Amino acid sequence: MQTRVNSLFNYDLKFLEEMGAYGFACGLESGSNRILKKIKKQETVEEYLEVNKKLSKTNISLWYNYILGFPEEKLEDIKATVDLALQILDENPNAINSTFAMLVPYPGTEIAEVYLNKNLLPKRLEDWKDFGRYNFASKFYSPERTSLYKKIYFSSKFTGK
């Protein structure tokens, strides 16, 4: 099932396991508290690590998802996200990191407003074809940043278990 990490504080995880829970998918998005605050995630890296440690004492598997390419994302935010993904794997043998996805600023979202103001969103419906979970064709990022994102995406296929 999909869930927010902080909602797992409300449950006896061993009981959930006994009742048949065998896997959770959690969108962590970022390993940077600065970015989490900017996107109004209402969760912290510390909560992610605490729940991950609690779940490591169960046989429940966890699929963690991450997003790269947030507005104002700095190299230290990217490094914090990669470091978090690796730490989670080290601390929990049941953790699985999904490949890193790229931000898609869907129309009507607050993040899309940032890109609208910079005139970076597609104007026509057919121009959205370049967007998706791995929208490396977008014009949001410099070639250097796009190259970095591609390398992280590719290497995450081999470190995610």
Image (tube, rainbow, N blue to C red):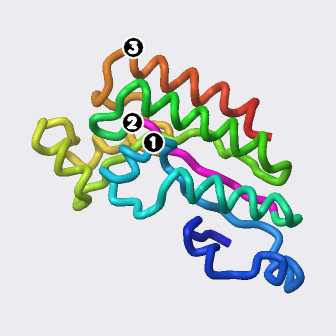
Reply above or below: 56 against 77: below
Q: Residue under circle 1?
A: 32
Residue 111: percent from the left, percent from the top?
26, 51
Separation (CA) of disc 2 from disc 1: 12 Å
In front: label 3 or label 1: 1
Give the amino acid type for the residue marked by disc 1 in the picture.
Answer: Ser
Q: Residue at x 64, y 73 (%)?
A: 8
Q: Residues within 10 Å of mark 3 (few under 14, many from 20)?
A: few
The answer to whether residue 63 is magenta is yes
Image location of residue 36, percent across then percent down: 40, 51
If you read the primary sequence from the N terminus, does the residue marked by circle 2 or circle 1 appear first? Answer: 1
Which residue is found at the position 43% from the left and 33% from the top? 77
Where disc 2 sits, the SS reads loop
Left or right: residue 88 compared with residue 40: right
Q: Main secondary structure of the magenta part?
A: strand
Quarter of the image with the N terminus is bottom right
What is the three-letter code of the residue carrying label 3? Glu
Q: Which residues are magenta?
A: 61-68
18 falls in the magenta region? no
Relative depth, front residue between 129 and 154: 154
